[in-house]
């Protein structure tokens, strides 16, 4: 390394002098593919504030050049580095090594999707689901007049970084493999803001019930537990959609009211 | 769609995909171009190194600059134009600056039409926040995650069109026919290492910047300058490559997050910079605009304070936003709060952040024609950060997101027109494809030898050289020494060797990137040697500020016949009267 | 509180489902015993399980195994059984669908993929939750009435610990009821634009208030369950003479 502390361009943010032997940290990382693989133990030097992704990249640069890991921003903004630590989905860039305090750190890929290699899973299924969701549409022309009061609850679902950890932890996908019938928590989050947007005038309730399979969700809240940006997926996205679907399909009084209104409308037009 | 070559001796299988328009890069600019072309009914393919929606656009936090005048009704495209030119120290492409200022509002409204949600004013309009060197409150924003909103909206829009998206696919070469026009590209999928020959009548480059040439960077692994060098290798002219922006505020501690961006929104919301003596020092550098001065000024101020020994514990300065209180911070800057609490154990509602300049953006890039972003190579268009011209010597915060959409759209239109006006074929000799495939596979398939180099270590070495020799203050000796080191590294690039197989092999991927990083570094240092002045982001300690003879000069770099770098001083075309008048009035202090 | 939550998270995954199952079973046994075998009327108070049914005769048409409190208690029972929070609790604790979130727990989910229908088959009936909510409004009204009655004795007005518990209980039961997801939907969750309709602002404010309550719905669910249990036990102990009801504010009227 070509370090030169005297150069004018090297002021500030320089490395702190090392003192004494460095502490080491052990990681067990899954190496393999969908067909199979095994956990391999690696040891790296511990740095202050180190996150698991730092450790994995260090192993990649110094020991195993072909160790596959997906990452981008390293700032918990993009949602690329989702993987499982000790069986729980985590963003590797946001998981501090010191959180595990000398306990085991087992790192593996997301398991609700086919494993490509090592820590990388094939998440392309999510983009197929995304493609079939009826996109935002407004008959009105922007710029819209929209008030903060009407849109304040939409900021939360809009925070989603598409890390797909909620999809990974959802037992409907992970354990029961209902990928054909069920869109997964991430896409109820999207459907929620679409449905609640004051300017959108599409009706997606039938899609949500039939194609997206909201009824398969049994609101056991694992998705909410793992969301790295703190979206209350179950309470603020899925349950409100379930309630709207109930309005439309499971509420006899509402059904009767629609029938009566429909008839009244019909008779007035004739 | 099928493989048209069998594996036979040295011949490799590859897939062929045909589109009218190939777009390389799926950030804001690439996706906007894709939407434009796809909605016109053309067949569009978009190639991205990452998953869709993960491009660096997502990191933009502060907002998108557009003179819509919702908060300050006096604002106009004219003032936005003036601010952009002033920020760029007048070496911007003035026509691009004009188009950008005029069209940004339309792009903001368009996003809203497609479902983007911005923060609102009490009147129910899009709210706008103040930002460095913008005269008026101008940035449409949503909290501190405007880039996420933009990219998600564009992504959902792209998925709603017929655009074919090729995720996690790396382009290695632009393919040119005998006349030199670009008729497609060769790429491989990162997942399986399968090669794809894209045939396209027109290609749009939208690959973003090259912040990865520095060690302390706010860029992700993707920012390796692929598009710039692919275009350079195809013969495209590059403009003002020396102009590299350092963001004044990157994190400094802990080491793992060094360089991570701290949004300018913090200063936009009233954040104050202080040194270790507790002094608010910006008054010494720009008493008028203080913390909201342009990025080059604030970055150098932070740098100088640390140099003068007034730095913080970990070698930065203090950025204090505690006056907003917990509630205010959670409303305006929730991401920052989370970022510092989680990664640095700092509660920014209670204590100041430690910050230091970090490489952020590259103003220089592929030279484009201002109306429709055509490069100097036929069939190749470029938009967004990989192109150059709009931002001159320094980019204003918020002008990037609007740049992406304004010129992404225009590049799309340019490509559509090009496709409609030309009937050329897209075939090239198969041997060209095979030669390129062999080159790409070489680091993996070549037998090991004593000269082998690790791509990771070579990249790290290059980053150290750039940090030392081409940082935010520069001088001739250091630059020349840096160039010598870069050229030495360049000689070692062919020795890069990796293990493993083609299946998702990051070592192999890095082996491809290193060529771009080295070449782009060489261009930067060579141009930085040529521009002997202090101007915006180019800060030559050994020369004066704003030297007149460089005031209307762009440095154009280009690949010469022997593969050497050719640099030309090119005069900026004279600015037309209606724009010159605006700048004159502004210089006299008049409002426009 | 957060340190307790952090400590709770560090426990093995099976602690939570077993605890929940244990508590719910214990509550079920106690409440069944109360409503089948015990009376609801004590000297001054009635059992919070009973409300007006405490003094009621079982109607002639009812089969013999029906006791008076059952005529009312199907409402809170149904309300809680179809509640979005309790659903999570019993799907996890009793059906292990899944028992917890990490891989090792999910792997133990007993149901096969073919048999898993979520809330599409039998449990689609949980969509009736809103009707139990409407019915609960009556129960709440009666309980408030009873709570106030506890402070008026034959001799005038007084507040004893028993009354205090009655009020604490009805406040918690109300918080649980009005933090219900269906109620949140009813008051404003079903609207897309508040500023577009007359009275929208009031609905938005109500919705926001209910949303804040709703964030603590699980807590209200448990607190109100325990307050019911505790109040009833306390009153039975007083009636049995085991303890004496302490008077906080004697004879005000």
Image (tube, coloured by chain):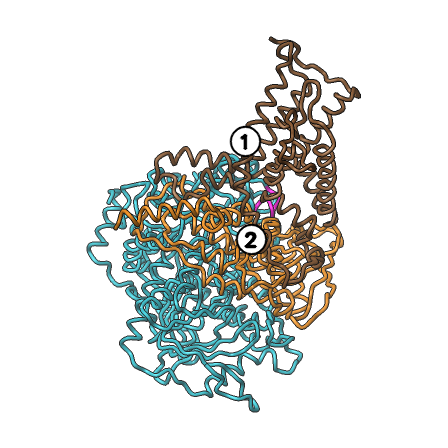
Q: Residues within 10 Å of mark 2 (few under 14, many from 20)?
A: many
The chain to which mark 2 is attached is A
Query: Foreground mark, 1 or 2?
Result: 1
Q: Which mark is residue C163?
A: none
Which image quarter: residue C116?
Answer: bottom right
Residue drawn at x 57%, y 91% is: B9
Pick the residue in front: C148 or A61. C148
| B242 with respect to B500 (left or right) | left
Between the residue at mark 1 and the residue at mark 2, the CA separation in whole angstroms equals 48 Å
Residue A91 pos. (x, y %) = 60, 55
Residues shaded magenta = B339-346
Which image quarter: residue C247?
Answer: top right
Residue furthest to the right in view is: C242
| B77 with respect to C27 (left or right) | left
Asked whether residue B293 appears in the rendered view, the answer is no
Colour representing chain C = brown
Colour representing chain A = orange
Please state, as top left, top right, bottom left or bottom right, where the N terminus of chain C lies in the image.
top right
Residue B86 pos. (x, y %) = 33, 51
Pick the residue in front: B199 or C62. C62
Residue B432 pos. (x, y %) = 46, 85
Query: How many numbered discs, if any?
Result: 2
Asked whether B344 falls inside the magenta stretch, the response is: yes
Q: Which mark is residue C138?
A: 1
Pick the residue in front: B568 or B327. B327
Residue furthest to the bottom in view is: B9
Q: Mark 2 — residue?
A: A76
Instruction: Indicate whether A82 appears above or below C236.
Output: below
Please state, as top left, top right, bottom left or bottom right, where the C terminus of chain C lies in the image.
top right
Any idea which chain is the cyan one in this picture? B
């Amino acid at each position: 390394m070509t370090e030169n502390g005297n150069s004018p361009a090297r002021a500030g943010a320089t490395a702190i002098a090392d003192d004494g032997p460095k502490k080491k940290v052990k990681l067990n990382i899954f190496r393999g593919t969908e067909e199979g693989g095994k956990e391999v133990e690696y040891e790296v030097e511990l740095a202050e504030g180190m996150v698991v992704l730092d450790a994995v990249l260090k192993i990649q640069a110094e020991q195993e050049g072909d160790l596959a890991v997906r990452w981008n921003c390293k700032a918990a903004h993009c949602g690329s580095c989702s993987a499982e630590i000790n069986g729980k989905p985590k963003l590797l860039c946001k998981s501090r090594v010191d959180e595990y305090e000398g306990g085991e750190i087992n790192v593996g890929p997301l398991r609700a999707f086919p494993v490509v290699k090592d820590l990388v899973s094939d998440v392309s299924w999510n983009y197929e689901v995304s493609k079939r969701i009826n996109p935002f549409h407004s008959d009105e022309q922007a710029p819209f007049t929209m008030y903060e009061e009407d849109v304040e609850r939409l900021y939360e679902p809009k925070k989603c970084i598409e890390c797909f950890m909620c999809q990974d932890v959802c037992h409907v996908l992970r354990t029961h493999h209902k990928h054909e019938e069920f869109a997964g928590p991430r896409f109820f989050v999207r459907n929620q803001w679409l449905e609640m947007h004051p300017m959108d005038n599409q009706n997606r309730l039938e899609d949500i019930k039939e194609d997206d399979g909201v009824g398969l969700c049994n609101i056991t809240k694992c998705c909410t537990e793992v969301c790295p940006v703190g979206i209350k997926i179950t309470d603020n996205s899925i349950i409100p959609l379930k309630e709207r679907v109930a309005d439309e399909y499971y509420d006899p009084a509402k059904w009767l009211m629609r029938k009566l209104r429909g008839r009244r409308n019909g008779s007035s037009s004739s | 769609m099928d493989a048209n070559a069998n594996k036979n001796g040295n011949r490799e299988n590859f897939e062929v995909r045909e589109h009218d328009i190939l777009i390389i890069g799926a950030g804001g600019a690439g996706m906007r171009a894709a939407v434009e072309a796809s909605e016109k009914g053309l067949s569009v393919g978009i190639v991205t190194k990452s998953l869709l929606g993960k491009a660096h656009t997502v990191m933009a936090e502060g907002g998108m600059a557009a003179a819509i005048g919702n908060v300050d009704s006096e604002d106009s495209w004219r003032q936005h134009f003036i601010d952009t030119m002033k920020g760029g120290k007048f070496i911007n492409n003035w026509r691009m600056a004009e188009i950008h200022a005029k069209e940004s509002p339309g792009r903001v409204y368009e996003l809203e039409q497609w479902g983007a949600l911005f923060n609102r004013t009490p009147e129910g309009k899009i709210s706008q926040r103040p930002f460095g060197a913008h005269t008026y409150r101008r940035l449409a924003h949503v909290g501190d995650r405007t880039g996420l909103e933009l990219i998600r909206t564009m992504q959902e829009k792209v998925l709603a069109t017929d655009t074919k998206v090729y995720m996690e696919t790396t382009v290695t070469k632009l393919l040119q026919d005998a006349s030199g026009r670009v008729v497609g590209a060769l790429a491989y999928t990162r997942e399986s290492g399968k090669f794809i020959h894209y045939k396209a009548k027109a290609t749009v480059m939208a690959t973003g910047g090259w912040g990865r040439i520095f060690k302390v960077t706010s860029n992700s692994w993707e920012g390796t300058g692929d598009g710039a060098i692919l275009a350079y290798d195809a013969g495209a002219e590059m403009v003002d490559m020396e102009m590299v922006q350092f963001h004044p505020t990157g994190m400094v501690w802990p080491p793992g997050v060094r360089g991570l961006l701290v949004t300018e929104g913090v200063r936009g919301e009233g954040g104050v910079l202080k040194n270790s003596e507790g002094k608010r020092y910006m008054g010494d550098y720009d008493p008028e605009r203080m913390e909201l001065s342009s990025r080059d000024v604030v970055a150098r101020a932070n740098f100088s304070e640390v140099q003068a020994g007034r730095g913080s514990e970990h070698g930065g300065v203090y950025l204090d936003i505690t006056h907003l209180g917990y509630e205010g911070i959670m409303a305006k800057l929730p991401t920052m709060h989370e970022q510092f609490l989680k990664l640095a154990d700092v509660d920014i509602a209670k204590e100041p952040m430690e910050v230091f300049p970090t490489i952020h953006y590259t103003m220089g890039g592929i030279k484009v024609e201002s109306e429709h972003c055509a490069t100097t190579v036929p069939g190749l268009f470029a938009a967004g950060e990989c192109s150059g011209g709009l931002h001159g010597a320094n980019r204003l915060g918020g002008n990037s997101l609007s740049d992406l959409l304004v010129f992404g759209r225009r590049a799309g239109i340019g490509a559509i027109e090009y496709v409609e006006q030309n009937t050329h074929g897209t075939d090239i000799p198969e041997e060209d494809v095979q030669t390129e495939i062999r080159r790409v596979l070489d680091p993996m398939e070549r037998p090991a030898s004593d000269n082998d180099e690790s791509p990771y270590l070579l990249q790290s070495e290059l980053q150290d050289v750039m940090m030392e020799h081409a940082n935010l203050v520069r001088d001739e000796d250091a630059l020349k020494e840096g160039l010598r080191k870069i050229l030495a590294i360049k000689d070692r690039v062919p020795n890069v060797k990796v293990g493993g197989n083609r299946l998702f092999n990051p070592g192999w991927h890095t082996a491809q990137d290193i060529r771009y990083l080295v070449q782009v570094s060489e261009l930067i240092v060579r141009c930085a040697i040529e521009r002997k002045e202090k101007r915006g982001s180019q800060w030559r300690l050994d020369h004066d500020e704003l030297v007149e003879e460089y005031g209307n000069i762009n440095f154009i770099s280009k690949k010469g016949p022997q593969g050497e770098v050719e640099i030309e001083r090119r005069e900026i075309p004279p600015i037309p009267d209606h724009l010159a008048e605006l700048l004159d009035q502004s210089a006299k202090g008049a409002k426009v | 509180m957060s340190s307790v939550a952090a400590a709770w998270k560090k426990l093995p995954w099976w602690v939570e489902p077993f605890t929940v199952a244990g508590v719910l079973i214990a509550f079920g046994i106690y409440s069944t015993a109360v409503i089948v075998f015990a009376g609801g009327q004590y000297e001054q108070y009635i059992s919070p399980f009973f409300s007006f049914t405490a003094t009621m005769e079982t109607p002639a048409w009812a089969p013999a195994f029906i006791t008076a409190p059952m005529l009312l208690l199907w409402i809170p029972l149904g309300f809680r059984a179809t509640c979005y929070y309790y659903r999570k609790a019993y799907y996890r604790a009793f059906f292990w669908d899944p028992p917890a979130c990490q891989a090792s727990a999910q792997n133990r989910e007993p149901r096969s993929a073919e048999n898993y229908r979520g809330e599409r088959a039998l449990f689609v009936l949980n969509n009736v939750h809103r009707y139990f909510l409407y019915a609960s409004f009556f129960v709440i009204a009666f309980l408030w009435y009873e709570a106030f009655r506890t402070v008026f004795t034959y001799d005038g007005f007084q507040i004893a610990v028993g009354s205090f518990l009655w009020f604490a209980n009805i406040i918690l039961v109300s918080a649980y009821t009005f933090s219900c997801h269906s109620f949140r939907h009813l008051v404003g969750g079903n609207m897309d634009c508040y500023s577009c309709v007359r009275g929208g602002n009031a609905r938005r404010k109500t919705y926001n208030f209910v949303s804040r309550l709703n964030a603590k719905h699980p807590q209200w669910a448990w607190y109100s369950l325990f307050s019911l249990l505790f109040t009833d036990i306390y009153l039975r102990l007083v009636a049995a003479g085991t303890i004496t009801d302490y008077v906080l504010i004697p004879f005000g009227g």
